[in-house]
Amino acid sequence: MKQLVTGRKPPSVTWEAWVDRLVREARERGEFDDLAGAGKPLPGLDQGRDELWWVKALMRREGVGVTPPTIAIRVDAERVLEAVSTMRSEAAVRSAVDALNERIRSVNRTAVSGPPSTMMPLDVERVVASWRSAHSGDERSDPVGGAGGPEERGG
């Protein structure tokens, strides 16, 4: 609203009459014109009753997720491996994979909710070799970048 209600309700007027007058005056001033969602149905009105509707709406609005860390780290790994192909230097690739590996190690060494972690740190040299061959035009490299060779899997 453009104008805040600063006056007090007169003692001789009922609450209902006072509020109705304030709304009527605000409408006359045009304070309700062009409100977002005007003339549209309320969102979620056709859904069942959910006591945590406001928490879910806040999480959507703020972009907060509740993905377990062991699942989130897999998504992070996919994003890093996709981003590697667009990186301009070997140092950037190494830095991105090292940062990802640190997050993987952190998830692996802490107790987390959700499914257990089976994600192993990526082989930095394999990812760099894949990046090098992709940037030199050699298509024979391992496109995934590897989640570790036999020495990392214990074989």
Image: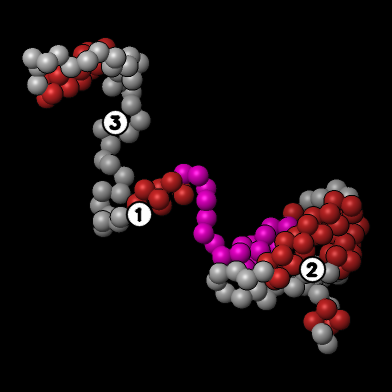
**Does the image show residue 139?**
no
Vertical order, 104 against 13 (above or below) = below
Which stretch is magenta?
Answer: 61-81
Distance Cα–Cα, label 3 vs label 2: 52 Å
Q: Nearer the viewer, mark 3 or mark 2?
A: 2
Residue 107 is labelled as: none
Q: Give the alpha-carbon distance from disc 1 to disc 3, as whole Å.
A: 25 Å
Q: Residue at x 8, y 14 (%)?
A: 12
The residue lying at 83 percent from left, 87 percent from top is 155
Q: Which residue is mark 1?
A: 52
Label 2 SS: loop
Q: CA distance from mark 1 to mark 2?
A: 39 Å
Residue at position x 78%, y 57% from top?
99
How many other residues sit within 10 Å of disc 1, few (<14), some (14-19) or many (≥20)?
Answer: few
- Left/right placement of residue 155 relative to residue 82 reads right
Amino acid found under the numbered disc labelled 1: Leu
Q: Nearer the viewer, residue 139 or 36?
A: 36
Figure check: 7 above or below 134? above
Residue 141 in the figure: left or right of residue 15: right
For the residue marked with disc 2, what is the amino acid? Leu
Q: Is residue 57 left or right of residue 152?
A: left
Of the two numbered discs 1 and 2 on the same chain, state the one appearing first in sequence. Answer: 1
Q: Quadrant of the N terminus?
A: top left
Identify which residue, 1 or 142, lies in the foreground: 1
Q: Which residue is mark 2?
A: 122
Q: Is residue 80 magenta?
A: yes
Q: Could you say where residue 144 lies in the image, as x and y percent from the top left?
A: 76, 68
